[in-house]
């Protein structure tokens, strides 16, 4: 019977190639047929491999120690030629403070390339700050309502497409003298707005009037009014405007009611807006109760909209206001979004509670239910306006 020492001797002879051909073949056949023998051989291989690696590490360490000792001996300065030093003193400074050859080379490199390294460091710092500034600007300009994948629908306008005569007439209507006055600014942005109350308050999208110096409201019969921003709700992309012209006498009773509750999924809806100089009608269906990226303050509707539709009213089949058109999705055809009218009602209610002046009288009862769509649109047109922004 083989002892543990016999097994190790056999394994070592096999590992070093000392077994003859028949003996080697016989041993390999035994390894394949005997799992216990194969396990013993695996344990032997692992153990000897570990010992061999340990021995190699020890030899490497000894070799490094010898190299280090040789380097120290080569770097030691010659003994000073003086008889006053004690016997055996070979260093004029503390030997623990000597500079190694590697450190001396690094110091020489730094001395010769100090300017280059400084410039490289400055460039690196500028690159970091430029990157941070770029990220900050990206966050600034990609916050709602202008998100990546989301297009706000304000229309860029090169100039007011009116003659000088029309401009002079409009200035006279505003009670301003044209003599000696500076030329009026040109409109750079336009969108849509609609009447909120009969007293002269209107609603549009916040991004339409953002950064405006002055506002001009223009209806389908070319009636024009100066307006000012009363309140802005950036989060829900809403802005309330007020007509400031003294000659304005009011809108009269509004034909639509403002719905405070939720609209139904699949409900037929329509809108009016000013993607061009003439009012444009669009219709579709309410396709989701949430807007871009699941924002529950907005509806998604299947209505083709274009720049200039922002701030337009979204109405149901009975002519009730259910939302304010805001934007569209870049990668989805005919997918538009509108702020829910319930958020507009909450905004007005909060302003009523905070202000001590005349309250907002929102229309509670509509006049369009049961009328055909052409009749509904005919009545609505007088209460939908193009909002021209002067910057």
Image: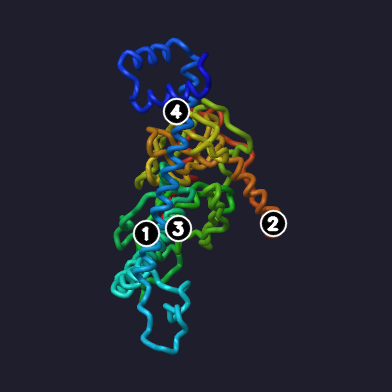
Q: CA distance from mark 2 to mark 4?
A: 86 Å
Mark closer to the observer (2, 3): 3
Q: CA distance from mark 2 to mark 1?
A: 85 Å
In the picture, measured across the screen, residue 365 lies left or right of residue 375, that is right
Q: Position of residue 359 (x, y in %)?
A: 67, 53
Residue under numbered circle 4: 45
First in sequence: mark 1 or mark 4?
A: 4
**Disc 4 to disc 3: CB gap under 8 Å:** no
Q: CA distance from mark 2 to mark 3?
A: 35 Å
First in sequence: mark 2 or mark 3?
A: 3
Residue under numbered circle 1: 67
Q: CA distance from mark 4 to mark 3?
A: 60 Å
Residue under numbered circle 3: 136
In the picture, measured across the screen, residue 232 lies left or right of residue 69, that is right
Q: What label does residue 354 carry, if any?
A: 2
Q: CA distance from mark 3 to mark 1?
A: 54 Å
First in sequence: mark 2 or mark 4?
A: 4
Residue 209 vertical placement versus 113 (above, below) = above
- Please, which colouring scheme is shown? rainbow
> What element does badge 2 sit on?
helix
Residue closest to the eye, 252 or 156: 156
Residue 296 vertical placement versus 174 (above, below) = above
**Is residue 24 shown to the viewer in this render?**
yes
First in sequence: mark 3 or mark 1?
A: 1
Q: Which image quarter is the C terminus in? A: bottom left
Q: Position of residue 164 (x, y in %)?
A: 30, 63
Q: Position of residue 104 (x, y in %)?
A: 35, 71
In the picture, measured across the screen, residue 162 lies left or right of residue 42, that is left
**Is residue 218 shown to the viewer in this render?**
no
Residue 287 vertical placement versus 208 (above, below) = above
């Amino acid at each position: 019977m083989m002892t543990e020492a016999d097994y190790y001797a056999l394994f070592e002879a096999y590992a070093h190639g000392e077994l003859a051909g028949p003996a080697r073949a016989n041993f390999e056949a035994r390894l394949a047929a005997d799992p216990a023998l194969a396990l013993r051989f695996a344990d032997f291989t692992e153990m000897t491999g570990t010992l061999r690696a340990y021995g190699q590490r020890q030899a490497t360490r000894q070799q490094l120690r010898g190299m280090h000792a040789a380097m120290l001996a080569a770097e030691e300065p010659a003994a000073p030629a003086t008889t006053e030093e004690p016997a055996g003193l070979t260093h004029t400074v503390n030997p623990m403070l000597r500079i190694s050859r590697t450190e001396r080379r690094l110091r020489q490199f730094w001395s010769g390339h100090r300017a280059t390294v400084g410039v490289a460091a400055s460039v690196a710092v500028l690159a970091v700050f430029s990157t941070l500034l770029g990220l900050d600007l990206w966050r600034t300009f990609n916050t709602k309502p202008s998100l990546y994948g989301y297009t706000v629908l304000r229309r860029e306008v090169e100039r007011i497409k009116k003659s000088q005569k029309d401009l002079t007439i409009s200035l006279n209507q505003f009670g301003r003298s044209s003599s000696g006055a500076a030329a009026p600014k040109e409109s750079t942005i336009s969108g849509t707005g609609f009447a909120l109350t009969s007293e002269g308050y209107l609603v549009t999208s916040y991004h339409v009037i953002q950064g405006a110096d002055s506002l001009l409201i223009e209806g389908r019969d070319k009636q024009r009014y100066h307006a000012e921003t009363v309140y802005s709700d950036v989060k829900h992309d809403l802005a309330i405007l007020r007509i400031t012209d003294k000659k304005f006498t009011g809108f009269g009773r509004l034909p639509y009611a403002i719905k405070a509750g939720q609209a139904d999924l699949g409900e037929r809806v329509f809108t009016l807006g000013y993607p061009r100089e003439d009012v444009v009608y669009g219709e579709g269906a309410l396709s989701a109760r949430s807007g871009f990226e699941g924002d529950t303050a907005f509806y998604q509707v299947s209505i083709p909209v274009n720049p200039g539709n922002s701030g337009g009213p979204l109405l149901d089949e009975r002519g009730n206001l259910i939302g304010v058109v805001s934007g569209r999705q870049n990668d989805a055809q005919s997918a538009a979004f509108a702020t829910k009218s319930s958020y507009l009602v909450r905004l007005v209610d909060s302003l009523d509670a905070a202000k001590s002046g005349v309250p907002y009288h929102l229309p509670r009862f509509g006049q369009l239910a049961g009328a055909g769509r052409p009749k509904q649109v005919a009545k609505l047109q007088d209460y939908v306006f193009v909002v021209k922004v002067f910057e």
